[in-house]
Amino acid sequence: MSGTASISKNRARGARRPDLRVIGPLVALVALVLIGMALNPNFLSYANITNVLARSAFIGIIAIGMTFVITAGGLDLSVGSMAAFVAGLAILVMNALAGSMAGLPVLLLGIALALLSGLAAGFINGILITRAGIEAFILTLGTMGIYRSLVTWLADGGTLSLGYELRELYRPVYYGGLFGVSWPIIVFALLAVLGEVVMRHTAFGRHCAAIGSNEKVARYSSVAVTRVKLATYVILGLLVGIAVVMYVPRLGSASATTGLLWELEAIAAVIIGGTLLKGGFGRVWGTVVGVLILSLIGNLLNLTDFVSPYLNGAIQGVVIILAVVLQRDTGAAR
Amino acid sequence: MKKTLIAGTALIGLYAGPALAETIGISIPAATHGWAGALNFHAERTVERLKAANPELDFVLTTTSDPGQQVSDLEDMVATRNIDALVVLPFESEPLTAPVQRIAESGVWVTVVDRGLSQEGIENLYVAGDNDSFGRTAGKYFADTLEDGAKVVVMRGIASTVDNERVAGFQAALEGSGIEVLAMDHANWNRDNAFNLMQDYLSRFPEIDAVWAADDDQAVGALAAIEQAGREGEMIVVGGAGMKEMVDRIRKGDKTVPVNVTYPPSMISTAIEMTALGLTGAAPMSGEFILASELITPENAEKFYFEDSPY
């Protein structure tokens, strides 16, 4: 395929001469780390770093999937509500099964259910967008409301909490780990590497970019547009399921406020990372950096009294804009 | 399209029922967090109980998730259901003041719950928890039990009048006690935010003697972070609102969670019952009814534990 050759040529050139557009998010990340070191000596402590990485994992895992959706010219606003709904459903079913089965099978069933229902929710989004031709923004705005209401309904307006024994059994999935690195961080890292490889080195990744940049041309170039677009939403749904599997053991509960605004944080992370909001170009490593930038801002604001807590949102806004400004294409306007 | 619209309006008109019945409109925030969930639970239960007891009473219950929607709900209630009384927990004080005032001026009985309107004298009845007392009770407990020079971190809720009043009460009670407040940040009455904030407090301060989480959802998040850091036993955590898990820990004598402060969501029942009484009975019901915040201790915890409540 001729498109493949030119893309790899571009990549080779980029690797030789990294400009600010490419390393912009990294510059912002390094700047935040330096500020953190200056503000608080505990910033680089083992506990703080693992805390920040582990709490980034949920949005990070979702944002990896979001990178593919956005690269292919789509959008998904429903992921935060979807996460809350999948978490609520898994907790409800695990609690219901707890009486009749041993702990471990219940847990495995709950995890399988979370993954499957995430996959199904992603499939519903994808099929309605690709087959019924509903605008992704509107459709996922609709499903966002539906899932948020469903979890509120499941929880009867309150909080769904995992039974005590299951919670103790499940706990190590968030708090445990290998060699002092907790599971959410390990899973996030593995998925990030996998996502980067898929985006850069597979036909699927290139097809996403081709569709996002010009759907018609992609169709004429015999890209299975509908199937690829559907796949991006299904993958995102599955990743939401994985994020939920990591999220539930943390507090063992889900409520109507679970995953609130996760969709916007995920989208912000993707864009900070250099993926184009209108599609056509995406990079997973940038998304990972974007997620870390967002969590670090929150962490830094908590570690200092430097600004009034009323202004936290303003600081976040400024950093997001700065991170994107840093990577503006100063050459030919895109 | 037009036909269905007309038919729809006709249906609503029919549904409004016999003109003799007294209709009470109830507008409260949607169940978006634990406390509001319990509020909804108690509102629905009270409506069912009153309906069964008074066949001549009719109720319209709406839940809203933003002030704009609440204004529309109120307009619909007046236009289509012709309500005789309104029980409203304003989502926000400012935007709801003028609409509620118009309804009051049209002769509808107005009961305002918990969040006051920004102008005085509009409502006939005001039923509310005492936010100042909520903070003051927790602050007084700290001042009485902690040593001079003890270090406290505070979790605030969503930036709002409620939060400000609580914090002001808390600080007033601590005055002159020699207790040092290390930091105050917002966790927005959310478990996940509280978990992250507590993690950061723990990395930032090597010594913390007490956490005022100010809300039981926040207390849940804070406790999980403290357990993760393995620093249980170093500090106490005081939440608020009387969530049943917290009350359960108190009655079992948990060292980390010694007390709690009430802010009963069942105040909506008080408001609906008093409004119904005012409409149907002869007893005077106008004025203000302020529910004090009580300290839940291991000794009295049993009285505050409700097995079937969702909160």
Image (spheres, coloured by chain):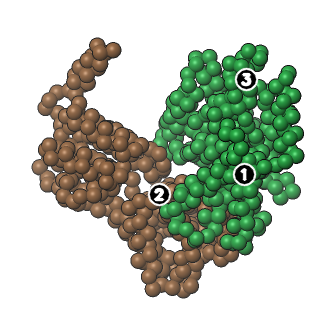
The answer to whether dots 1 and 3 both sit on one chain is: yes
Circle 3 SS class: helix
For disc 1, the chain is A
Q: Amino acid at mark 3?
A: Val
Is residue A151 in view? yes
- In this rendering, the label closer to the viewer, 1 or 2: 1
- In this rendering, the label closer to the viewer, 2 or 3: 3
x%, y% of residue B224?
A: 64, 59
**Residue drawn at (75%, 53%) of the image:** A26
Q: Which residue is mark 3?
A: A228
x%, y% of residue A78?
A: 58, 35
- In this rendering, the label closer to the viewer, 1 or 3: 1
Q: Amino acid at mark 1?
A: Pro
Question: What separation in Å lies between label 2 and label 3 (alpha carbons)?
Answer: 42 Å
Q: Which residue is mark 2?
A: B158
Marker disc for residue B30:
none
